[in-house]
Amino acid sequence: MCTDEERDPWLPDRLLRTERDLLMPLLRRTPEEAYELRTACPGWTARQVLAHCGAALVRIVEDRLEEGVFLPEANACDVAAREDWPLGRILDELERGLTEAGPVIAAREDGRLDAVALGEWVHAGDVREAFGEPGAYCGQALELALPLLTVTSRKRETPRLVGVLADKAAAPVSLGNAIEGRPPATFKGDAATLIRIYAGRPLVRTRYVLTGATEQELLIYR
């Protein structure tokens, strides 16, 4: 796992490109009516989530990152601006963003935009779940998403947590920052549930044991 000092600047690019290759074929073959299904993002359909994703990435590509650009109000404006776009145009913009945003993110030495790449992958999980597809919040790109979650959880100043993942034979994951006088929290469950906790996604029908921290303390997107 990467620490802040060991940031891999090209990890977000690898995650975005991998997700592009996995997600875009699914999106291109999905009937248009499915895009009106509601997602885990309150008030947003699958179409609106993808419009947000494409808009955010193209803002990065085109260096349109004015103050407050990724706040909820700005995100809602980007989605509203695409309300009359045909679905194909929304998907084309998303594919462009997944392809071109990674090098721009890598060039940012502060790593401030790394969390955007992770958020795009989480949103892909939102859409998969809405479509009833397997692999929401896990799947083939999980091995890239977990190291990025490690870095993001530290930058977002969540408390230290050691996660023992039931569906992974690898060593436990270490997330967040050590706090003097406070032992690390522990998580036991599957990887998708761990992602749900950190991303603030619904935990209905999940099974896990979390000790030493609350779900609210672990949120990386507020």
Image (cartoon, rainbow, N blue to C red):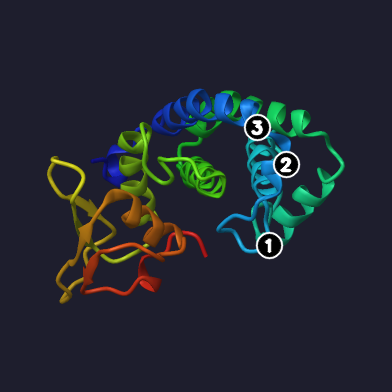
Q: Position of residue 47 (x, y in %)?
A: 70, 44
Q: Amino acid at mark 3?
A: Leu
> How far apart, in angstroms, are the residues tagged by discs 3 and 1?
20 Å
Q: Earlier in the sequence, mark 1 or mark 2?
A: 2
Give the vertical position of 62 relative to 216 (above or below).
above
Q: Amino acid at mark 1?
A: Gly
> How far apart, in angstroms, are the residues tagged by discs 3 and 2?
19 Å
Does 14 sit left or right of 206 as displayed?
right
Camera-nearest label, 3 or 2: 2
Dot label at residue 127? none
Dot label at residue 94? 3
Q: Identify the secondary structure beneath mark 1.
A: loop
Q: Identify the secondary structure beneath mark 3.
A: helix
Dot label at residue 43? 1
Q: Residue at x 48, y 27 (%)?
A: 22
Camera-nearest label, 3 or 1: 1
Q: Residues within 10 Å of mark 2 (few under 14, many from 20)?
A: few
Dot label at residue 33? 2
Q: In terms of depth relative to the viewer, which is nearer, 85 or 1?
A: 85
Q: Position of residue 139 (x, y in %)?
A: 37, 37
Does 186 sit left or right of 50 as displayed?
left
Q: In terms of depth relative to the viewer, which is nearer, 1 or 141?
A: 141
> How far apart, in angstroms, are the residues tagged by discs 1 and 2?
17 Å
Q: Position of residue 197 (x, y in %)?
A: 38, 62
Task: Please state, as top left, top right, bottom left or bottom right, where the N terminus lies in the image.
Answer: top left
Q: Amino acid at mark 2?
A: Glu
Q: Identify the secondary structure beneath mark 2.
A: helix
Q: Residues within 10 Å of mark 1 (few under 14, many from 20)?
A: few
